[in-house]
Amino acid sequence: MITLYHCNAARSFRPLWMLEELGLPYDLKMLPFPPRVFAKDYLAINPLGTIPYMIDGDTRMSESSGICHYLGTRYGPTPLVVGVDEPAYGAFLNWMYFSDATLTFPQTLVLRYTRLEPEERRNPQVATDYAKWFFGRLRAVEAAAGKADTLCAGRFTVADISVGYALRLAENIGLAKDFGPNVAAYWQRLQARDGFKRAVAAENLAGEQQNVPKRV
């Protein structure tokens, strides 16, 4: 049984969504955010105190997009993964890395300096600057979403899951109102997927059952 440690609406949603798209059984362990502060016992499992953290037999992983790629290749074949022999393989990998390193990174600074830091340490200028950074990079998604319903290979893939989480985070921190029309439509298409809906439902149910409040 795969075990996934997750915080509500955090980047661990990527592998949760992937698990639902693949139809794999899993055990979802909910943690308060940030777990390194509010769930110190978790440090014995993941010394970094970050989420996600996935355990699959002897395999231990902490990078959200990497976990999705692992699941698709380990438990495939699946059309969710673009193969090395497909023309879109390079684009697929680029979107996978882009999703976290380029899109999610500036969002975490917006989140930190608007909500997570104590009031006296919050910094509207930092948040504004990194929001602009995020939207500058989001232009790539706006362009791609204007040409096709999905990002690459002519079908829904792990790339859409990885980038889709960045759009969910943008919505949660108040940035979605400034999405371009193509990104806004793309985000609506992603939310309409049954796999996405199942992942949100699983997240909510596990949080209720394990008495873990949603993040602010």
Image (cartoon, helix red, strand yellow):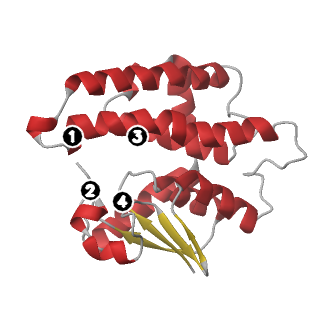
Residue 148 at x, y percent in the picture: 71, 26
Q: Residue furthest front?
A: 47
Evaluate whether residue 75 shows in this view.
Answer: no
The residue wearing badge 1 is 115
Q: CA distance from mark 3 to mark 4?
A: 13 Å
Q: Earlier in the sequence, mark 3 or mark 2?
A: 3
The residue wearing badge 3 is 169
What is the three-letter code of the residue carrying label 3?
Leu
Is residue 132 toward the left or the right of residue 156 in the image? left
Query: Which residue in the structure is indicated by mark 4?
Result: 7
Please tell me whether mark 1 sits on a helix, a strand or a loop: helix
Q: Earlier in the sequence, mark 1 or mark 2?
A: 1
Amino acid carrying label 2: it is Lys
The residue positioned 46% from the left and 56% from the top of the image is 12
Q: Residue at x 24, y 21 (%)?
A: 125
Front one among 195 and 111:
111
Report the front residue among 45 and 111.
Answer: 45
How many residues crowd around disc 1 within 10 Å: few (fewer than 14), some, or many (20 or more)? some
N-term-proximal mark, 1 vs 4: 4
Mark 4, other Cα within 10 Å: few <14 / some 14–19 / many ≥20: many
Label located before the other in sequence (4 or 2): 4
Look at label 4 and name its amino acid. Cys
Residue under circle 2?
214
